[in-house]
Image (cartoon, rainbow, N blue to C red):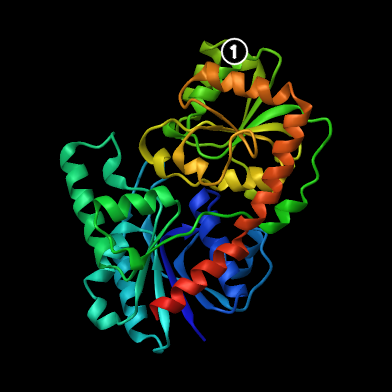
């Protein structure tokens, strides 16, 4: 049986998008017949069964969750620690001592990939890396840090056996600007759980919705500012993080606080409940930073739920969505343009129904099962 080894130097479970994507991808691959080893840290009190329960997944014998020691406390209020050495060397020992079967090592953490590449001659397994963003393009970093990250990224992307990119924009960028060979780079978008296609929409939809992280490049600030141009609407923001208080202050400043409700972070399994009651869902990314390559989980989840979408007009979104067919696009970073797009959607029952229906049909191409099929074929090519 073909084996996939997926090391993650963090602790499960976690409600952030990358953890949701990782566990669902591993689960779908295991259901396709791969023997999947998710090697990671575990939070206190959690075992395999509780991890499955946390993410609402049925048991799967082909998916093994293997715990390794990890020293990482980045969210601790007083004592923040992040040192991957103990995990890295424990992983190396596991790889060298394991029963030698055909296996692909699947990574998405840059430092871990750089570490394992130093030992590839003795590991003797193909290594593939899933690219989600280019860290050296982060404008908040100084020039020295950017140069160091760029050097690491180029080294990893050129030396691994396979590269998976979550958008074609990212794939094309790596081919043209980092000279990655085309025959080892693949485009595989993110996905959603197929049962979300069964979400029953409430006919009395009551709010505009945003779900997910609140980083500045996600454009939630723009969405809040847009609310002052649509005075009769309510906005629900589902997501937490360090910027939550700042966004609440912005809502007060824009005089829309009484119509903007911040739910905070909620278990991923509860998101369908909110989407079923949403009259519209927004992807307000600004045209900077990671947005140029973004393929957010929420995009596919909105589509699956049949919630009409208003989205920033960005190339990465245009890979999936079509203006006035599956979404309404607006100029990124422009609150007035965003409010106009929302008004256009809500003022036309015909357009509203068309976007909802078309997006739900289109979404069927992006289930985790379809994603697993593509990754399975890539693994077979690499072995």
Apparent side of residue 328 relative to residue 197 in the rendered image (left or right)? left
Query: What residue is rendered at 35% in x and 45% in y?
Result: 79
The residue nearer to you, when weighing 90 against 221, is: 221
Q: Quadrant of residue 210?
A: top right
User: Height in image: 65 above or below 200?
Assistant: below
Query: What residue is rendered at 48% in x and 29% in y?
Result: 219
User: Height in image: 261 above or below 180?
Assistant: above
Apparent side of residue 206 relative to residue 292 in the rendered image (left or right)? right
Image position, residue 53 (x, y; %): 66, 61
Q: Give neighbour class at mark 1: few <14, some 14-19, many 20+ (Cα, 10 Å).
A: some
Query: What residue is rendered at 34% in x and 68% in y?
Result: 183
Point out the residue furthest to the right here.
Answer: 203
Circle 1: element type: helix
Question: Considering the image in quadrants, where does the C terminus appear?
Answer: bottom left
In this rendering, does residue 354 appear at all? yes
Query: What residue is rendered at 55% in x and 48% in y?
Result: 297
Image position, residue 146 (x, y; %): 21, 43
Image position, residue 4 (x, y; %): 46, 75
Q: Quadrant of residue 50?
A: bottom right
User: Height in image: 189 above or below 50?
Assistant: above
Image position, residue 21 (x, y; %): 53, 56
Q: Name the residue beneath numbered marker 1.
A: 228
């Amino acid at each position: 049986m073909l084996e996939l080894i997926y090391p993650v130097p963090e602790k499960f479970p976690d409600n952030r998008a990358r953890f949701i994507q990782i566990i669902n991808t591993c689960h779908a691959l295991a259901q396709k017949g791969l023997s999947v080893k998710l090697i990671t840290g575990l939070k206190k009190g959690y075992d395999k069964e509780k991890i499955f329960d946390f993410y609402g997944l049925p048991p799967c014998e082909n998916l093994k969750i293997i715990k390794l020691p990890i020293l990482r406390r980045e969210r601790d209020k007083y004592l923040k620690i992040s040192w991957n050495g103990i995990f890295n060397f424990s992983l190396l020992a596991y790889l060298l001592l394991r029963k030698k079967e055909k296996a692909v090592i699947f990574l998405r953490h840059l430092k871990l990939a750089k570490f394992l590449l130093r030992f590839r001659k003795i590991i003797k397994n193909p290594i593939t890396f899933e690219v989600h963003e280019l860290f050296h393009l982060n404008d908040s970093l100084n020039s020295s840090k950017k140069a160091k990250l760029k050097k690491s990224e180029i080294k990893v992307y050129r030396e691994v056996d396979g590269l998976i990119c979550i958008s074609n924009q990212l794939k094309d960028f790596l081919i043209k600007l980092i000279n990655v060979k085309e025959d080892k780079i693949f485009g595989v978008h993110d996905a959603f759980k197929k049962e979300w296609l069964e979400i029953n929409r409430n006919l009395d939809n009551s709010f505009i919705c945003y779900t997910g992280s609140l980083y500045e490049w996600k454009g939630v600030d723009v969405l809040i500012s847009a609310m002052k141009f649509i005075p009769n609407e309510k906005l629900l923001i589902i997501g937490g993080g360090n910027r939550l208080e700042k966004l609440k202050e912005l809502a007060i400043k824009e005089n829309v606080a009484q119509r903007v409700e911040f739910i905070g972070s909620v278990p991923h399994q509860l998101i369908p409940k909110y989407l079923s009651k949403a009259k519209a869902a927004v992807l307000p990314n600004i045209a900077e930073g990671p947005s140029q390559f973004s393929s957010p989980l929420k995009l596919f989840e909105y589509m699956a739920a049949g919630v009409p979408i208003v989205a920033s007009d960005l190339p990465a979104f245009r890979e999936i969505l079509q203006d006035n067919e599956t979404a309404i696009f607006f100029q990124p970073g422009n609150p007035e343009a965003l409010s106009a797009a929302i008004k256009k959607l809500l003022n036309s029952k015909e357009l509203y129904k068309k976007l909802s229906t078309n997006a739900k049909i289109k979404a069927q191409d992006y289930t985790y099962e379809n994603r697993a099929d593509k990754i399975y074929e890539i693994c077979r090519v690499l072995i």
